[in-house]
Amino acid sequence: MPVALNETHDPTRKSFVESANAPGSDFPIQNLPFGIFRRAAGEPPRLGVAIGDQILDVAAAAASFEGPAAEAGRFSSVPYLNHLMSLGPQVWSALRLALSRGLSIEHGDARLREHLTPMAQAEMRLPVAIGDFTDFFASIFHATNAGRLFRPDNPLMPNYKYVPVAYHSRASSVRVSGKPFKRPRGQRKGPNDAAPSYGASRNLDFELELGIYIGAASELGEPIPIGRAAEHVFGFCLLNDWSARDIQAWEYQPLGPFLGKNFCTTVSPWVVTAEALAPFHTAAFARPDGDPAPLPHLDDAEDRAHGGLDITLEAYISTETMRQTGAAPQRLTQTSCALLYWTASQMIAHHSSNGCNLNIGDLLGSGTVSGPEKSSWGSLLELTTRGTVPLTLPGGEKRGFLEDGDEIVFRGYCEKPGAVRIGFGECRAAVLPAG
């Protein structure tokens, strides 16, 4: 069941933090995403909440709270959000309510001003201690586009419309936004090569994805019913599942992605809670006539009616030359999570359907979010037809795949009439030369 609307979603509520009230702000008082920050090198990391262009120290703020919100405050001087997640949905909601009231003009506590830190002066950390990372393939448009490049006559595998396909990736190489990474090395074999060679990837790509953080664990051997799956979600982030397409193409048969994927995954620092997204639920993607109905463990009337998420995702590129000349990043794509063939609840229900237990802090990726039009395709693999039709950037540079020095920036936001726009901030990382 989607989270019910409450006073924290009131579109008329304003904050005494003036930047939170600015049109287009990612972090109005209706958002209040959580992250881990520190104010200076050497200081311990702390739990913060984003409000406008400021970060509120939750532990310091919670000293004036009561009840469950005060209890949550005692878990705020910690290096990850996992401790807060372990307290459960009622406590998450109570803390959000206390923060909303405390930061509002109507009920605000002026003492909270002394616990604000400008974002520009803070170092953001990885928000969650991630135990496991599973990446899905939930966009039928991406699956079709990618499949057509490798199997022109049969782009979709026969199981795609029946099962939310996924693979297990590497949690140890997940990094927070802003951390550059080295171009991976690996085996690659072109169609005209007699034998594979080992070296730096030539076909480095991004994948524009939504990340889902599990906040409530399940028991080994006990599948999560689809109607209860949303209760296990703490929040969402932007996720870049970097991909070395040449390494991936050589290694993926017969067991799927491995070294072409697990060298780095970048996530945004702010976790937008499931409660904050309550106004932006929509109907699940409408399956075309003739597609099979989901199997019973993946079918739920409430999920069909409200299981989709209307989140706009965008990817931008900033080359080294662009940065040197002061040029703004160039948008490559704009798409929507409402176009995903499989909902978050379906992914969670299927992940656990064999009895696999999900743990607090697990990260799920949606897979590349692509739409039906080229302007909504979420990877260079699609946008450049596997590198054969390069994009021309405003300064004349061309890109089939990513070059050293390129930086990819993701942005995400939700907006609709009657609700205040909320955003995810940025998810960015630059490519360094291979080590």
Image (spheres, rainbow, N blue to C red):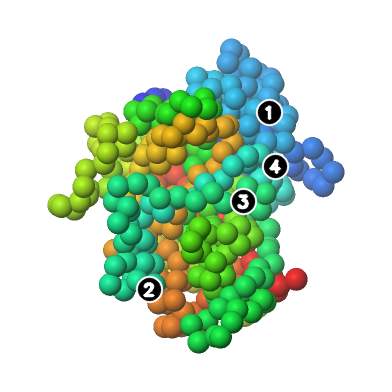
Circle 1: element type? loop
Measuring from the top left, give residue 301's x and y in whole percent: 24, 32
Front position in the image: 8 or 239: 239
Q: Residues within 10 Å of mark 3 (few under 14, many from 20)?
A: some
Q: Dot 2 corresponds to which residue?
A: 149
Q: Residues within 10 Å of mark 2 (few under 14, many from 20)?
A: some
Q: Dot 4 corresponds to which residue?
A: 37
Front position in the image: 380 or 262: 262
Q: Dot 3 corresponds to which residue?
A: 170
Asked if disc 1 and disc 4 are in contact, CB closer than 8 Å, the reply is no
Q: Which of the two discs, 2 and 3, labels the residue nearer the N terminus?
A: 2
Measuring from the top left, give residue 395's x and y in whole percent: 52, 84
Discs 4/3, front = 3
Q: Residue shown at 15%/52% (left/top)? A: 290
Q: Residue shown at 45%/50% (left/top)? A: 166
Whether residue 73 sits left or right of residue 412 in the image: it is right
Q: Dot 1 corresponds to which residue?
A: 76
Q: Which of the two discs, 1 and 4, labels the residue nearer the N terminus?
A: 4
Query: What quarter of the picture does the N terminus occupy?
Result: top left
Asked if disc 2 and disc 3 are in contact, CB closer than 8 Å, the reply is no
Discs 1/3, front = 3
**CA–CA distance between discs 2 and 1?**
48 Å
